[in-house]
């Protein structure tokens, strides 16, 4: 319920000298005596031509906005003097009329003369008018209290519903987080299982390969050492026989016809020249077999299960010798070795890495039509903290979508039966075990480069 003023305008003007009344279009239709004296043209003037609203803050000065803010205290600044009014807007029921009831804000008497009013301008109110005003204000406040109580109950009910909904959402979120954690745990367990499986396969593979290589090396080592050891005596005996034949020819130049015929039949002069060459060729062959045996033993290194200081170049050379049958099929291997210190590592495992990468490079080159197939192996010392090994081919390169997966266990681009997909995955784990880094740089049409960095103490 909004206030209804039944007092005549002239009584209101005297009882409330600083009040004014305006319509829906903001035209002031009534004002108190003091306001009429201070602002002679206030009647029929627009509200906005007489006052400025300092409080509350409103974006647009219109009737509807002022009416909505009527529960607030208004502070108005006169646009005709320094007077500031403080009071309340009181909308009238069923009509577009608002009463402003207030008084000037004065803290000192000397301010009265500055704004053009006197102490007597503050009217002594008629008791009946004051009673009516208080009664109307009380009714309005009661209505507002009832309305606010209703809104408060609605708000509390809404909050309760929101709280119930929030609890349900919280339970759903908690369940979702539990499911997400289970999924992450399963994913981690699967990766660990893959890693463990790969490590077991690698361990068994290396153990089997090492035992086989060591067995072959042992079986070759004994007979080749026997042959190589006796070659020295054979060479010496042959030289002695050749010397003896030459002495016979020197002291008995006239041999019998039968001896001369047999010398011509066996072409003695050619035998004397070619026989030392054959012995030298046999020695070269046995030396190569001995080198192969040493390389096989270096590659397997079954007697070196623990870490030790080794020369990486020896491991690379041994690997190249073992792969020589493949590399001789039109691939040129360039070695650009730097001055490296010995590296504290597991030798056989690093040799396995070199073999996997070089063998893959050779396979990639066989798939190209490039005439000059090359594998370049570079070694260097990186800022005195890492030994760097680069193995680069000039093949077709690796597509981006494949390059991101080459270190995944069991991933291979080779046909079924030609690749297990474990070589690079095992290599990655071996380098990780050495606290090193393995990276691949590849561009289609420009080849592939694997870079291995191993820390040094």
Image (cartoon, rainbow, N blue to C red):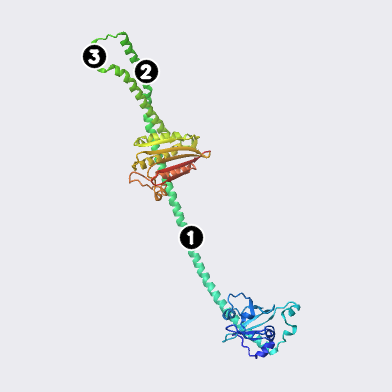
Residue ID for mark 2: 236
Around disc 2, counting alpha carbons within 10 Å, would you say few (fewer than 14), some (14 to 19), or many (20 or more)? Answer: few
At a point 46% along the width and 37% down the height, the residue shown is: 379
Cβ–Cβ under 8 Å for marks 1 and 3: no
Around disc 3, counting alpha carbons within 10 Å, would you say few (fewer than 14), some (14 to 19), or many (20 or more)? Answer: few
Residue ID for mark 3: 261
Camera-side residue of 84 and 165: 84
Judging from the image, what secondary structure is the residue with disc 1 in? helix
In terms of image quadrants, where is residue 254? top left
Depth-wise, is mark 3 or mark 2 nearer the camera?
3
Judging from the image, what secondary structure is the residue with disc 2 in? helix
Q: Residue 390, how many percent across, how many down? A: 45, 40
In terms of image quadrants, where is residue 204? top left
Residue ID for mark 1: 177
Q: Is residue 137 above or below residue 162?
A: below
Q: Residue 378, how many percent across, how many down? A: 45, 38
Q: Is residue 331 above or below residue 82?
A: above
Cβ–Cβ under 8 Å for marks 3 and 2: no
Sooner in the amino-acid sequence: mark 3 or mark 2: 2
């Amino acid at each position: 319920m909004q206030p209804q003023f039944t007092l005549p305008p002239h009584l209101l003007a005297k009882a409330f000298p600083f009040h004014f009344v305006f319509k829906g279009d903001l035209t002031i239709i009534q004002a108190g005596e003091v306001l009429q004296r201070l602002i002679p043209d206030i009647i029929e003037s627009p509200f906005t031509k007489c006052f400025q609203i300092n409080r509350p803050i409103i974006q647009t000065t219109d009737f509807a906005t002022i009416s909505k803010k009527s529960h607030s205290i208004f502070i108005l600044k006169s646009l005709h003097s320094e007077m500031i009014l403080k009071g309340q807007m009181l909308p009238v029921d069923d009509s577009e009329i608002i009463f402003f009831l207030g008084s000037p804000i004065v803290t000192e008497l000397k301010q009265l003369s500055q704004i053009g009013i006197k102490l007597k301008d503050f009217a002594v109110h008629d008791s009946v008018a004051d009673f009516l005003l208080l009664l109307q204000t009380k009714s309005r406040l009661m209505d507002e209290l009832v309305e606010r109580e209703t809104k408060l109950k609605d708000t509390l009910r809404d909050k309760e519903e929101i709280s119930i909904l929030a609890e349900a959402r919280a339970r759903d979120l908690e369940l979702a987080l539990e499911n997400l954690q289970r999924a992450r745990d399963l994913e981690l367990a699967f990766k660990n299982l893959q890693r463990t499986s790969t490590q077991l396969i690698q361990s068994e593979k290396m153990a089997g390969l090492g035992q086989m290589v060591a067995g072959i090396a042992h079986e070759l080592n004994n007979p080749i050492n026997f042959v190589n050891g006796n070659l020295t005596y054979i060479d010496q005996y042959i030289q002695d026989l050749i010397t003896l034949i030459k002495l016979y020819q020197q002291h008995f130049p006239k041999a019998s016809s039968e001896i001369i015929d047999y010398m011509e039949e066996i072409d003695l002069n050619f035998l004397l020249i070619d026989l030392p060459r054959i012995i030298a060729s046999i020695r070269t062959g046995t030396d190569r077999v001995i080198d192969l045996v040493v390389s096989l033993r270096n590659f397997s290194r079954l007697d070196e299960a623990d870490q030790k200081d080794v020369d990486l170049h020896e491991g690379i050379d041994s690997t190249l010798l073992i792969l020589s049958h493949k590399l001789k099929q039109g691939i040129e291997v360039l070695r650009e070795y730097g001055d490296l210190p010995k590296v504290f590592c597991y030798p056989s495992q690093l040799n396995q890495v070199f073999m996997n990468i070089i063998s893959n490079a050779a396979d990639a080159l066989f798939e190209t039509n490039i005439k000059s197939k090359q594998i370049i192996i570079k070694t260097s010392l990186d800022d005195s903290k890492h030994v760097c090994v680069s193995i680069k081919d000039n093949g077709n390169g690796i597509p981006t979508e494949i390059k991101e997966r080459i270190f995944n266990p069991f991933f291979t681009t080779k046909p079924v039966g030609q690749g297990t997909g474990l070589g690079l995955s095992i290599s990655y784990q071996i380098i990780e075990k050495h606290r090193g880094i393995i990276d691949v740089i590849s561009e289609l049409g420009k080849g592939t480069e694997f870079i291995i960095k191993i820390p040094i103490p």
